[in-house]
């Protein structure tokens, strides 16, 4: 399953400046393992102390937040796009 | 009886109107709740009144005292608070990201609020940080802090939620935009208690992409009132799609609403495509008036899209 991960500006120092990374994997968790093995600096930013998602990160698969799908077990279709976004305050 | 003693009595009881023309399936009905009908022009009038009422009840605010209320807001909460403050004898200082539409700033000013600008590229995080600094420097300031104040979801739990279930008892899905999360937390909790099978959908713009200048993830923010367990789904809707649905609301349904309303409708329609039959209620936070200067209905869509990545329209 080839998917594209978009890396937010704040994390690009960990990916040699790359904004998009192509990775293979059947679930979000598998894709994260792969991208972390390539860019180990990402680990502390993606994964929290409890092994789950970092609390200030939101991950979207084709624009759907994975916290409301199956989390890191969310399955990926070929060509899916994964967006990693920092959690920031919304307007109000 | 449509006669009232005070403009504050006009807050709430907003109408639901069918926007079924936008549904991809005749068995999926979509009902829009028009929060632009509130006297200050947005859903935020509800929380402004409830936050002030509860602060008065706690003795934090005293009517007619001229106390200064301080609030970080991208516009609507500030406008609602300015209205309540004017009628209750308070002053208001709003920390406003500088990249909001000119109309929001104009409205704050004519309602009598003092505006302190925060850097646009820092988004609402920057406005919150600046307001916290100002509050720390002057203990006379009363910060109601919509992102952390239980009176915010409470206004929707006591008002918006019951109105929706009263007017649409057959509701299957509630869809709204997420800012402080007050709307979704309050309506969500009310529906989970009274109509547990209803699904709660959140829509948000890709704010994390637009905010610049985060040093690291620890600059992140999750509103203290937010509880992920209240939502069943959360979807990103991007500026272009938001503008397209804002236009279709007007051209196909005659509903003149703001750009975050277009985003909420986009989320509702996306859900409608996945089900056979449903009644979806979507909340439209404000009318289109404050977005005329964005060219949302008039200018080339590529130009408006580019503007919307720089302007804070939520
Ligand atoms: C235009 C607009 N859309 C959406 C929202 C989000 O609402 P909430 O803060 O209840 O999540 C707001 C909040 O002011 C708003 O002004």
Image (cartoon, coloured by chain):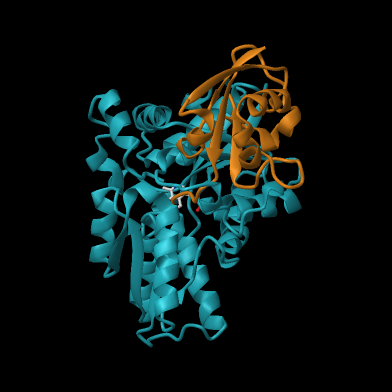
Across and down, in percent, residue B118 comes to 33, 58
**Residue found 51% across the figure and 37% down from its top:** A11
Can you tell which chain is drawn orange? A
The residue closer to the viewer here, B156 or B23, is: B156
Residue in the image at 56% along x and 66% along y: B149
**A42 relative to A10 in the view: left or right:** right
Q: Is residue B8 visible?
A: no
Closer-to-camera residue (B231/A4): A4
Q: Quadrant of residue B276?
A: top right
* Residue found 40% across the figure and 81% down from its top: B138
In this rendering, would B224 be left or right of B73? right
Q: Nearer the viewer, residue B71 or B257?
A: B71
Q: Chain B is shown in which shade?
A: cyan
Residue found at x 26% / y 70%: B112
Quarter of the rendering containing residue B67:
bottom left
Q: Position of residue B22 (x, y in %)?
A: 48, 26
Would residue B215 be found to the left or right of residue B97 on screen? right
Q: Is residue A75 visible?
A: yes
Residue B86 is drawn in which quadrant?
A: bottom left
Residue A4 position in % (x across, y down): 56, 19
Label tally: 0
């Amino acid at each position: 399953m080839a998917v594209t991960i978009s890396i937010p500006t704040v994390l690009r120092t960990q990916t040699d400046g790359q904004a998009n990374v192509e990775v293979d994997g059947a679930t979000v968790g598998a894709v994260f393992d792969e991208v972390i093995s390539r860019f180990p600096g990402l680990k502390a930013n993606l994964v929290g102390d409890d092994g789950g998602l970092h609390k200030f990160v939101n991950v979207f698969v084709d624009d759907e937040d994975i916290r409301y799908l199956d989390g890191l077990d969310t399955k990926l279709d070929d060509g899916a796009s994964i967006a990693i976004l920092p959690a920031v305050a919304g307007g109000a | 009886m449509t006669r009232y003693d005070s403009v504050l009595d006009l807050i709430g009881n907003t109408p639901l109107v069918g926007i079924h023309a936008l549904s991809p399936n005749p068995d999926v009905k979509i009902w829009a709740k028009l929060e632009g009908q509130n006297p200050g022009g947005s859903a935020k009038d509800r929380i402004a009144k409830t936050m002030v009422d509860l602060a008065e009840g706690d003795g934090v605010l005293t009517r007619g005292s001229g106390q200064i209320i301080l609030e970080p807001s991208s516009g609507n909460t500030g406008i609602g608070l300015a209205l309540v403050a004017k009628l209750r004898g308070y002053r208001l200082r709003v920390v406003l990201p500088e990249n909001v539409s000119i109309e929001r700033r104009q409205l704050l000013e004519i309602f009598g609020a003092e505006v302190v600008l925060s850097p646009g590229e820092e988004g609402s995080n920057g406005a919150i940080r600046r307001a916290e600094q100002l509050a720390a420097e002057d203990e006379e300031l009363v910060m109601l802090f919509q992102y952390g104040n239980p009176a915010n979801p409470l206004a929707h739990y006591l008002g918006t939620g019951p109105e929706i279930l009263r007017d649409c008892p057959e509701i299957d899905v509630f869809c709204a935009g997420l800012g402080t999360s007050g709307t979704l937390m309050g309506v969500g909790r009310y529906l989970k208690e009274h109509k547990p099978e209803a699904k709660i959908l959140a829509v948000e713009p890709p704010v994390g992409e637009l905010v610049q200048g985060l040093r690291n993830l620890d600059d992140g923010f999750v509103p203290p009132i937010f509880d992920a367990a209240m939502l069943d789904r959360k979807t990103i809707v991007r500026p272009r799609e938001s503008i397209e649905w804002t236009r279709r609301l007007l051209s196909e349904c005659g509903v003149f609403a703001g750009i975050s309303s277009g985003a909420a409708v986009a989320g509702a329609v996306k859900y409608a495509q996945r089900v056979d039959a449903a009644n979806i209620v979507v909340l439209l936070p404000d009318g289109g008036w404050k977005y005329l200067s964005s060219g949302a209905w008039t200018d080339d869509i590529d130009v408006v899209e580019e503007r919307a990545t720089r302007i804070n329209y939520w």
